Image: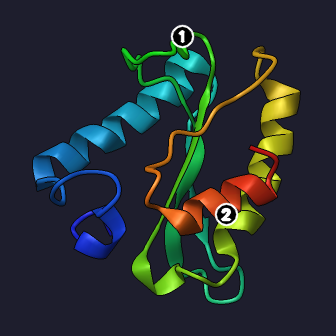
Amino acid sequence: MWSDPEVTRYISTQPPSASASFRRLLIYGGHWNFMGFGYWAVEEKASERFLGEIGFADFKREIVPSIEGVPELGWVLASHAHGKGYATEALNAAIPWGDKNLSASRSVCIIDPENLASLRVAEKCGY
């Protein structure tokens, strides 16, 4: 999924290397172990086919305005899963989990302004 330019076009200038993708996997595991939250794999229920990743993270971004201490909700779906409602369905499961399990009073999403599909999903979910 991470090597697909269609998937990464709003995330980075080029798909990450295998090494960078492996580091991302380690960061995901570290979030669960050290922060108590992280990313989940998203699968299609009927086929168990991998669709993507969704979850909460604290990437320690140095941005303005600061989001320090505020979990960042993110999602990435494989291109074969785009436009089928999976992101909205997954967010509608993740957000209540976050409301129940995160100590923060809110979460944020960081979305490229040109990523209209993700902006629509975020808006549908209250962001």
How far across and how far down the image is residue 119, in percent?
61, 57
Q: Up-down: is 124 above or below 49?
A: above
Q: Is residue 62 left or right of residue 97?
A: left
Q: Nearer the viewer, residue 89 or 101?
A: 89
Q: Nearer the viewer, residue 106 or 33?
A: 106
Q: Residue furthest front?
A: 113
Label ID, residue 55: none
Quadrant in the picture for residue 20: top left
- Residue 31 seen by the camera: yes
Which kind of residue does numbered mark 1 sit on? Glu
Label ID, residue 120: 2
Secondary structure state at the residue bearing disc 1: loop
Judging by the rendered image, the residue that carries numbered circle 1 is 68
How far across and how far down the image is residue 11, in percent?
33, 52
Give the CA distance from mark 1 to mark 2. Answer: 25 Å
Q: Could you classify mark 2 by the number of other residues whose Cα lies within 10 Å: few (under 14), some (14-19), or many (20 or more)?
A: few
Q: Is residue 113 left or right of residue 92?
A: left
Q: Please tell me which residue is depicted at 57% across the width and 52% down the height of the picture.
A: 54
Quarter of the figure with the C terminus: top right
Secondary structure state at the residue bearing disc 2: helix
Quarter of the figure with the N terminus: bottom left
Q: Is residue 125 left or right of residue 3?
A: right
How far across and how far down the image is residue 104, in percent?
75, 16
Q: Which badge, 1 or 2, comes first in the chain's sequence?
A: 1
Which kind of residue does numbered mark 2 sit on? Arg
Q: Could you classify mark 1 by the number of other residues whose Cα lies within 10 Å: few (under 14), some (14-19), or many (20 or more)?
A: few
Q: Please tell me which residue is depicted at 35% across the width and 68% down the height of the picture.
A: 7
